[in-house]
Image (cartoon, rainbow, N blue to C red):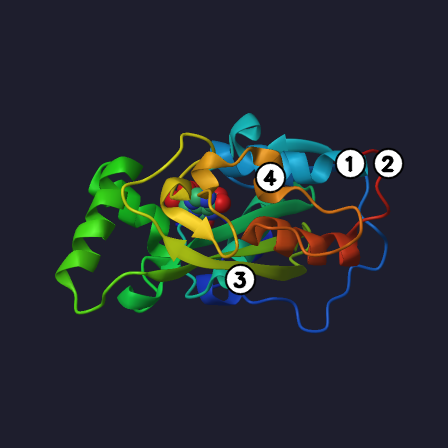
C-alpha cells in the first residue's frame, strides 16, 4: 500500500494519482529534490538528465523510502502516485518516473505492467525470452512494432503534482543485443537506428540535443517537457 503522510490518511489511491488540475509550477525548481525510484537504471538516467541544472538529488533508496504499490492505470497516474508518496514522506519536492515497453502485437502489453512482467518471469533475460515466445505463438509476423513510454511527475509535499510524457517508437529485435542500458533495452531498436538501446551508451540513448530538437529516448523526451516547464536554464553541459 501507499504510505500516506498523516494529513492524507483516508485519501484513496485513485485520488492520490490524479494530476492537480490547472497546476503550473510558478517558481522554477531549485535546491534539493528526491528522485523517487528504486530502479538503479532509471536513477542513473534521471541523475544524468538533472545534472546540468544544478539541482541536488537524493534517491528513495538513500532516504529509505518504501516502494508504493502502483495502482494507477496509466504511466502518468503511476508516476504521480510515486512522486506524491515520496514528497509527502520526505517533505521535499519529488520527481518520479513510470515507464514501460508497449508491444503492438500484444495489445500494448506489458506496458504499465513491464516491471511486474520481468519480476514474474524471474528477471529481464527470462522476460525478453518470454516475450519472444509469446510473439512467436501469436498470429502476428515480424517486424514487431513497439514503443517505450515514460511519464515523469513532479510532486510537492502539499500534494500538488504534474506529469510530462514522452514516447519513442521502434521495433523489437530477437535475440537481445547489447549489454549497455537496463531492463528491456537489448530488444528495442528505435526507428532510424541500427543499434538497440542495449548497444547505445547512456549519452546516445538519453542526452538532450543542444539545439532543442527532441532527444531519442522516451525519458529524454518527457524530461524536455519537464525542463521547459519546471527548470531554469542549464548551468553546465
Ligand atoms: P520504480 O517504480 O521504483 O521507479 P520500477 O522498475 O518498478 O522502478 P516501473 O514500475 O516504471 O519502474 O517499471 C518500468 C519497467 O520498464 C521496468 O521493468 C524497467 O526496467 C522497464 N523500463 C523502463 N524504462 C526503460 C528503459 O529506458 N529501458 C529499458 N527498460 C525500461
Residue farthest toward the top in the current orientation of the protein? 62
Any part of residue 6 in sight: no
Q: Which residue is mark 4?
A: 204
Q: Are marks 3 and 2 in contact (CB under 8 Å)?
A: no
Check if mark 4's residue and mark 3's residue have beta carbons within 8 Å. no
* Mark 1 to mark 3 CA distance (whole Å): 25 Å
Whichever of callouts 4 and 3 sits on the residue coming sooner in the sequence is: 3
Disc assigned to residue 171: none
**Residue 139 image-quadrant placement:** bottom left
Label 4 – label 1 distance at C-alpha:
16 Å
Spot occupied by residue 136 in the image (x, y as percentages of width and height): 17, 57
Tag 1 secondary structure: helix
Q: Earlier in the sequence, mark 3 or mark 2?
A: 3
Q: Which mark is residue 76?
A: 3
Residue underneath mark 1? 52
Calculate the distance from the C-alpha at mark 4 to the C-alpha at mark 2: 21 Å
Residue drawn 64% across the image and 31% down it: 58
Task: Indicate if the residue with disc 2 has its beta carbon within 8 Å of ligand 1.
Answer: no
* Residue 68 x, y percent position in the rendering: 44, 47
Q: In the shown orientation, is residue 8 left or right of residue 234?
A: left
* Nearest to viewer (mark 4 / mark 3): 4
Nearer the observer, 70 or 3: 70
Report the residue that reaches farthest toward the bottom: 22
Task: Quarter of the image for the C terminus: give it.
Answer: top right
The disc, 4 or 1, on the residue closer to the chain's N-terminal end is 1
Amino acid at each position: 500500500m501507499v504510505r500516506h503522510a498523516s494529513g492524507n490518511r483516508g485519501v484513496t489511491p485513485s485520488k492520490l494519482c490524479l494530476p492537480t488540475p490547472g497546476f503550473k509550477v510558478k517558481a522554477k525548481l531549485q535546491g534539493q529534490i528526491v528522485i523517487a525510484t528504486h530502479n538503479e537504471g532509471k536513477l542513473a538516467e534521471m541523475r544524468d538528465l538533472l545534472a546540468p541544472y544544478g539541482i541536488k538529488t537524493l534517491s528513495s533508496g538513500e532516504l529509505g523510502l518504501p516502494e508504493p504499490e502502483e495502482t494507477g492505470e496509466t504511466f502518468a497516474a503511476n508516476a504521480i502516485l510515486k512522486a506524491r508518496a515520496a514528497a509527502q514522506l520526505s517533505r521535499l519536492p519529488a520527481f518520479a518516473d513510470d515507464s514501460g515497453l508497449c508491444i503492438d502485437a500484444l495489445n500494448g502489453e506489458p506496458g504499465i505492467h513491464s516491471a511486474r512482467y520481468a519480476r514474474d518471469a524471474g528477471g529481464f533475460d527470462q522476460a525478453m525470452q518470454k516475450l519472444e515466445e509469446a510473439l512467436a505463438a501469436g498470429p502476428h509476423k515480424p517486424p514487431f512494432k513497439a514503443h517505450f513510454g515514460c511519464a515523469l511527475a513532479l510532486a510537492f509535499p502539499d500534494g500538488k503534482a504534474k506529469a510530462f510524457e514522452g514516447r519513442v517508437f521502434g521495433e523489437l529485435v530477437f535475440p537481445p543485443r547489447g549489454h549497455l542500458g537496463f531492463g528491456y533495452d537489448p530488444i528495442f531498436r528505435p526507428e532510424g537506428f541500427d543499434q538497440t538501446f542495449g548497444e547505445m551508451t547512456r549519452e546516445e540513448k538519453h542526452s538532450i540535443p543542444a539545439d532543442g530538437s527532441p532527444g531519442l529516448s522516451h525519458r529524454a523526451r518527457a524530461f524536455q517537457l519537464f525542463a521547459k516547464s519546471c527548470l531554469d536554464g542549464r548551468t553546465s553541459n
